[in-house]
Image (cartoon, helix red, strand yellow):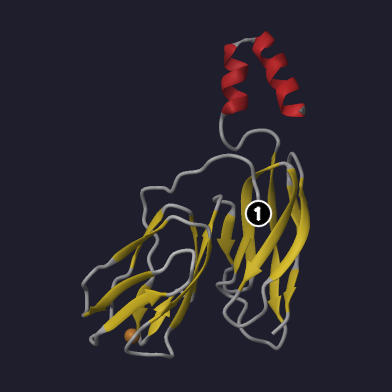
């Protein structure tokens, strides 16, 4: 509502004002940031934080996300991606690995392959995709396929920042390898930032 009013006024004021308002990252967008803590003292690094139901349509960027086989583990353990993304699955180990998922949203099978042989998979449906290796049953990863690009992962201190979020009230969720998923409501201001700290139960 407010946005439309602004635009109509801007059109009256001239073309250049309209162009400025339409530029990404200007006006009526705020930043969500905070600290994620995992109860029980496990590392709070690489926990996915994402905002649901942000209006708009979004396309993946040219840079492909990567889910690697490395030291007999998938890296990263949790990988959030935008719907439609092609994810590369390089094998950095000197042993054979595979990657597959039986998750209903995006089932796939890349077969068994050796070092350096790059395989890939396009994730076209939003959902949680649990990934395993046929050869090493202890190898697990999760790809979160999301509807919008307003997601990130925590840094070494458990901190996260999601910038340029259109102002509004949303649900923010987290996903981690060692804790339960969380859900809470957040209000993104039209300018500046809001701090939301999140505690995850083991
Ligand atoms: Cu393996």
The quadrant holding residue 16 is top right
Looking at this view, is 159 or 115 the one in front?
115
Q: Where is residue 78 in the image (x, y as percent from the top left)?
A: 51, 72
Q: In this view, does 119 lie to the left or right of 163?
A: left
For residue 165, above or below residue 132: above
In which of the image's four quarters is ligand 1 placed? bottom left
Give the residue at x 70% y 68%: 35
Q: Is residue 66 left or right of residue 55?
A: left
Give the residue at x 30% y 64%: 120
Q: Position of residue 157 (x, y in %)?
A: 62, 73
Q: In which quarter of the image is the N terminus?
A: top right
Give the residue at x 52% y 58%: 126
For residue 67, above or below residue 60: below
Looking at this view, is 155 or 91 the one in front?
91
- Label 1 crowd bin: few (<14), some (14–19), many (20+), radius 10 Å: some
The quadrant holding residue 190 is top right
- SS of the residue at dot 1? loop
Q: Quadrant of the C terminus?
A: bottom right
Circle count: 1
Q: Position of residue 139 (x, y in %)?
A: 42, 86
Q: Position of residue 45 (x, y in %)?
A: 58, 75
User: Where is mark 1, residue-wise?
Assistant: 52
Q: Outermost residue, front direction?
A: 104
For residue 134, above or below residue 193: below
Question: Mark 1 CB in 8 Å range of ligand 1?
Answer: no
Q: Is residue 177 left or right of residue 116?
A: right
Q: In this view, does 39 lie to the left or right of 155?
A: right
Give the residue at x 36% y 87%: 72
């Amino acid at each position: 509502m407010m946005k439309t009013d602004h635009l109509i006024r801007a059109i009256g004021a001239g073309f250049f004002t309209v162009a400025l308002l339409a530029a990404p990252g200007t006006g009526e967008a705020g930043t969500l940031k905070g600290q994620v803590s995992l109860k029980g003292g496990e590392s709070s690094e690489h926990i996915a934080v994402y905002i649901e139901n942000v209006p708009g349509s979004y396309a993946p960027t040219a840079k492909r996300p990567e889910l690697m086989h490395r030291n007999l583990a998938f890296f990263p353990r949790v990988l959030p991606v935008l719907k439609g993304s092609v994810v590369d699955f390089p094998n950095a180990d000197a042993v054979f690995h595979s990657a597959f998922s039986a998750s209903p949203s995006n089932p796939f099978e890349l077969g068994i392959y050796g070092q350096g042989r790059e395989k890939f998979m396009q994730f076209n449906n939003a959902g949680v995709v649990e990934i395993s290796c046929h050869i090493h049953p202890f190898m697990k990863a999760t790809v979160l396929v999301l509807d919008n690009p307003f997601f990130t992962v925590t840094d070494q201190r458990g901190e996260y920042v999601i910038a340029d979020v259109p102002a509004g009230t949303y649900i923010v969720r987290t996903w981690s390898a060692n804790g339960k998923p969380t859900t809470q409501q957040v209000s993104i201001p039209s300018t500046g930032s809001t701090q939301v700290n999140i505690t995850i139960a083991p």
